[in-house]
């Protein structure tokens, strides 16, 4: 099985009480409806339960072309966007996309590539 997805960065979980960390993470999860975001370690635990063995893992985050806005502008746009009525699905999605860029830039989220194999 090949899995390429966003994971919470294990090494930054100590910052989880940071207000900026929580604001961006929540905006990403709400905007993109990411309810089951977990750490890489948690994903590997769930894989082991299903007898999946990790063959390869790579952090692809450094290869991304991030388009994160300056912090002050991103915060302003998030506040304005959250104040608008969200009748159209595009608004939460756009805010979630912006929040993902901020999360990746801040190291809250990492984009990982995993190759897993079923074992007996």
Image (tube, rainbow, N blue to C red):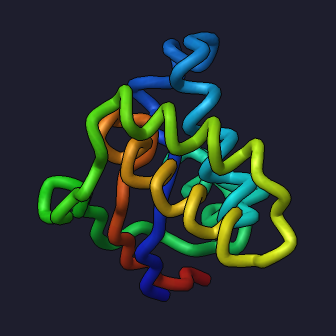
Q: Residue at x 19, y 64 (%)?
A: 64
Residue in front for this viewpoint, 81 or 7:
81
Q: Residue at x 76, y 52 (%)?
A: 84
In which image quadrant can residue 49 be found? bottom right
* Image-based side of 2 in relation to 91, left or right: left
Residue in front for this viewpoint, 45 or 114:
114
In which image quadrant can residue 93 be found? bottom right
How many numbered marks, from 0 up? 0
Q: Residue at x 35, y 47 (%)?
A: 104
* Image-based side of 107 in relation to 108, left or right: left
Residue in front for this viewpoint, 77 or 46:
77
Q: Where residue 3 sits in the image (x, y, percent)? A: 46, 78
Above/below status of 13 relative to 87:
above
Q: Where residue 20 sits in the image (x, y, percent)? A: 53, 21
Above/below status of 116 relative to 99:
below
Q: Quadrant of the C terminus?
A: bottom right
Residue in front for this viewpoint, 43 or 106:
106
Above/below status of 57 relative to 109:
below
Q: Where residue 13 sits in the image (x, y, percent)? A: 52, 23
Above/below status of 82 relative to 19:
below
Q: Residue at x 56, y 66 (%)?
A: 94
In which image quadrant can residue 27 be found? top right
Q: Where residue 102 sits in the image (x, y, percent)? A: 39, 43
């Amino acid at each position: 099985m090949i899995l390429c997805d966003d994971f919470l960065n294990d090494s930054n979980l100590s910052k989880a009480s940071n207000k900026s960390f929580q604001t961006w993470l929540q905006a990403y999860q709400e905007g993109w409806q990411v309810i089951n975001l977990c750490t890489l370690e948690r994903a590997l635990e769930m894989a082991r339960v299903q007898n999946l063995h990790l063959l390869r893992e790579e952090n692809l985050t450094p290869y991304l072309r991030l388009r994160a806005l300056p912090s002050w502008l991103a915060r302003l746009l998030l506040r304005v966007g959250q104040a608008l009525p969200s009748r159209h699905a595009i608004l939460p999605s756009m805010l979630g996309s912006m929040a993902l860029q901020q999360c990746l830039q801040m190291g809250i989220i990492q984009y990982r590539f995993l190759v897993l194999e079923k074992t007996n």
